[in-house]
Amino acid sequence: MVDISQIQEHAEVIAADGTHVGTVDHVQGDRIKLTKNDSPQTEDGQGGKHHYISVGLVADIEDGKVRLSSTGANTQFLEEDE
């Protein structure tokens, strides 16, 4: 079991296949809030939105990086937030 208290702000989040998923903004309950910088801009050119992923997807925390148990294509964002 992974100790989620080890997840640091601004840590890179990487999928099992090595794909960059995002950057940690902070941990909020049982989910990781990712920074807006990694989110694509909207069609009207506005900035991205925060996305959340479940801490249940975290396989390991090593060298300051959060590694997920799912591949980039299979990583499901729980929700978006402004």
Image (tube, rainbow, N blue to C red):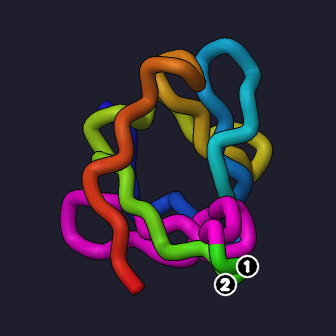
Which segment is the magenta one? 24-43
Q: Is residue 41 magenta?
A: yes
Q: Residue at x 21, y 70 (%)?
A: 29
Question: Which image quarter: residue 25?
Answer: bottom right
Instruction: Tell me residue 31's x, y (percent).
Output: 29, 59
Q: Locate the N terminus by quadrant.
A: top left
Could you tell me if residue 9 is visible in this image?
no
Q: Classify 46 as above or below 12.
A: below
The type of residue carrying mark 1 is: Gly
Question: Percent from the top left, x then y, of residue 51?
Answer: 44, 63
Q: Residues within 10 Å of mark 1 (few under 14, many from 20)?
A: few
Determine whether, in the image, residue 69 is placed left or right of residue 38: left
Point out residue 78 in the picture as x, y percentages from the top left corner: 27, 51
> Label 1: which residue?
45
Residue annotated with mark 2? 46
Instruction: Answer yes or no: is residue 42 visible.
Output: yes
